[in-house]
Amino acid sequence: MQSATLPIPKHPANVDARVASLSLGTALLNARLPATLNRPSMLPGTEHEITSPELAKKILDILKREHASAGFHIREQWLADVLGVSRSPIRTALRDLERLDIVRSEQKKGYFLEADVGSEAFDNVNLPMAETERIYRQIASERFAGLIGDQISVADLVRRFQTSRSVIRKVLASMQEDGLVEKTAGHGWIFGPALNDEASYQESYRLRLLIEPAALIEGGFDLPLAELADLRRMHHAALSKGLANESIASLFDIDAAFHDTLGEACGNRFLAQAIRQQTRLRRLSEYEKYTERERRARSFEEHLSILDAIERGAFIDAAERMALHIRTSDANRPDFRKVRVLAHRRLTRR
């Protein structure tokens, strides 16, 4: 299925344009804040088993990219090919979605989408969290709060979370894919760079300031109209309902969708991968849960202004707005030490 793309001119590929882009990158790094201030792809890491809730979420993501509407025929073999798994786990995940009234089954015909993508029923589906994802997030939270040291072992984590070795191995494999842990020469694992302290957050913001504006001035940047419209719809829906009525997790999902979608649109796989990793690290950080809703509202308005610039074909303007957005977010972060104390109290409360 082909999707419409924005009717905006490609960036010139001459030397002057490249020099201008390099100059912009330098200017963005040196800029100061005013004082007042998709196509579905094979899953990475499918060598370890994917749980039904994880598959159900990925199926919803695929349907969203396809902009499917109610009545869309969901073919098991198509999903199996896209996700790199057999039809059996696909069928289990579809049954889970049927129980949530998102899809329906018809005898000898298969499964069909029950709710339009973008509808309230589709967007608000409440999938159970997989055990591996729950443990993954708990490890990240406890690491942030200083409750887990620099090195861990499978045996320690089995005892800590009262689960099986196979589950812990899957968790560690996922964390390794995300660059959070590395295997040691023995039987242990050691934590890599993560957003666990003030210095790491400063480094993350500096990296994001380098790569996210740069993604918007890549010569191959191409954002489908349907994806831009989806991003707008999500932001306007949250702002119109009032952010006080939305969960922190759902607000972060909107933020993540914005940054990751623009990263994917740049056409540079390495930039897109780096942006995705930073989003994943932020999602797993306990620190992100303490951002004030008022700041999130302003952040969503900034996102919308960036989308407006992209739609006009004003890529330089969009890049400058993105740089200002990242610097503003950095300047308005909550006090890191206070957040760590609050996180420690919450996780150790009996």
Image (spheres, grey):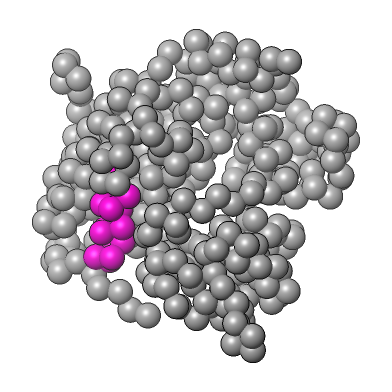
Viewed as shown, does residue 1 lie left or right of 8?
A: right
Which of 110/257 is in front? Answer: 110
Residue 230 painted magenta: yes
- The picture quadrant where one finds residue 209 is top left
Q: Residue at x 31, y 61 (%)?
A: 227
Tell me, yes or no, if residue 323 can be seen here: no
Q: Position of residue 212 (x, y in %)?
A: 32, 44
User: Who's the residue at 35% across and 27% down the image?
Assistant: 293
The image quadrant where one finds the C terminus is top right
179 or 67: nearer the viewer: 67
Instruction: Tell which of 253 and 274 is nearer to you.
Output: 253
Image position, residue 161 (x, y; %):
80, 33
Residue 305's place in the image compared with 105, above or below, is: above
Q: Position of residue 62 (x, y in %)?
A: 48, 67
Is residue 15 a member of the stretch shown in magenta?
A: no
- Total count of labels: 0
Quarter assignment of residue 301: top left
Q: Is residue 155 above or below residue 62?
A: above
Part of the protein shown in magenta? 220-235
| Most common secondary structure along the magenta stretch | helix
Q: Can residue 87 be seen from the camera position used here?
A: yes
Tell me: residue 196, above or below residue 317: above
Taking the image as shown, residue 238 lies to the left or right of residue 27, namely: right
Left or right of 256 on screen, residue 237: left
Q: Nearer the viewer, residue 18 or 343?
A: 343
Q: Quadrant of residue 11?
A: bottom left
Question: Residue at position x 41%, y 36% from top?
Answer: 246
